[in-house]
Image (cartoon, grey):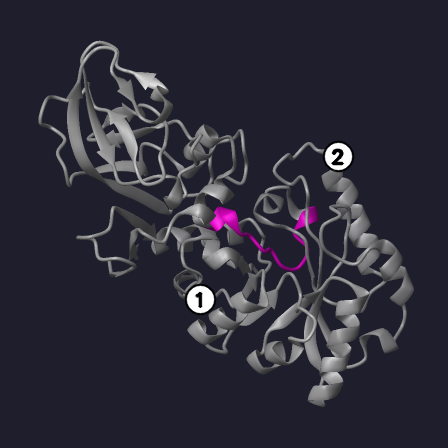
Amino acid sequence: MTSHSTGPDAAVAGAVLTIDLAAVRENYRRLKARLDGKPCAAVVKANGYGLGAAEVCRALMQEGCDTFFVAHLSEGLDLRAAIGNATTIYVLNGVAPGSEAEAVAAGLRPVLNSLDQLAAWRSAAKAAGRTLPAAVQVDSGMSRLGMAPSEVDEIAGSNDAFAGIDVTLVMSHLACADEPEHPANELQRINFEALRRKLPSAPASFANSSGIFLGQPFHFDLGRPGVALYGVNPTPGEPNPMVSVVRLDVKVVQTREIGDGVGIGYGYASRARLDMRLATIALGYADGWHRRAAGAAWFEGERLPFAGRVSMDSIILDITSLPPGKLKAGDLVELIGPNQSVDDVADYAGTIGYEILTGLGSRFHRVYRG
């Protein structure tokens, strides 16, 4: 298995983040298999959900993925420079006013979310002297991005509205796809069907990671999974159908013994129960580990609970259960891995796996495998 690394050298970094690109590819294959032969794109916004958009895209291109979605124009420009011109890159937020020429020059496709964005892209096509491709997003009920039904009605059947624009995709986004029984899913699907019929004929995309698991009526012509590619469970409450992608191992900075009743960490939020042994590790909320994410680390199969509060750059572990001298400065303990998934960590923090992944810090030594 090939590997390469980025970020600070392992000798000086406080932690090692391992990203398994073979697992990303396996997750893509699993998701694509559920689409019953329909094409599958990949959402790589927020730098590939914090794991490295360029590396993820190169891995997925080996699986035949040729369509990617980012959030911002800046992300699209960086990705185009990294992976070349052989792929289609959509910009979900569209293009900010005045930056259309940059998108045209890079061969990026905006997702047009409003009549203003549509008009600006029309002007860009006229300035470029050629037809420009774009996606159109409609708001089927999430109230976040996309043309409102009234805006769709305003341009329905108008040839002039799309002068110089090749509509290559019509799309919308599900608000409650991770709750399969939620009535909003079917209502949004019906709304999307109605709205897309009023727009130029084009392939349709509706299913995000969880949407793929809602079944064939939600698949349309292009799936666009995001977080499931990175191992986060797209079916909360059910066994995770994805394979794990990330592992986070953190260095021990020092160990100590303390007596009964001694305060531990900021605010003395914990106190020793009888005599204890502690280890301080090089991870904190500056690295994306939430301050309220009370949890544990693992070492050779032994769970080591947090003691006290998470600090900016460090966490204290209770290592009393280990034999004296078993864990030493410089050793690595597992924070994300076989014993503790991204979703487990999210549960500790009262958040979702998306936030955990995208918050993983820049101080880690990053190893890409597979």
Question: Relative to residue 303, is residue 51 drawn left or right?
Answer: right
Counting from the top left corner in percent of width and height, residue 95 is at: 66, 69
Task: Label 1, secondary structure: give it.
Answer: helix
Q: Is residue 190 above or below residue 351?
A: below
Counting from the top left corner in percent of width and height, residue 156 is at: 89, 65
Question: Relative to residue 183, is residue 33 drawn left or right?
Answer: left
Q: Quadrant of residue 222?
A: bottom right
Tell me which amino acid carries mark 1: Met
Residue depicted at x 8% and y 27%: 325
Tell me which amino acid carries mark 2: Pro
Residue depicted at x 87% and y 78%: 160
Residue depicted at x 85% and y 55%: 149
Instruction: Label the magenta part by its dominant secondary structure.
Output: loop
Q: Is residue 204 above or below residue 107?
A: above
Magenta span of residues: 217-229
Q: Is residue 293 above or below residue 13?
A: above
Task: Label 2, secondary structure: give it.
Answer: helix
Hey, which residue is sitting farthest bottom in the picture? 129
User: Which residue is labeled 2 in the image?
Assistant: 183
Could you classify mark 2 by the number of other residues whose Cα lies within 10 Å: few (under 14), some (14-19), or many (20 or more)? few
Q: Quadrant of residue 262?
A: top left
User: Which residue is labeled 1 in the image?
Assistant: 61
Which of 264 and 245 lies nearest the eye of the viewer?
A: 264
Mark nearer the N terminus (2 vs 1): 1
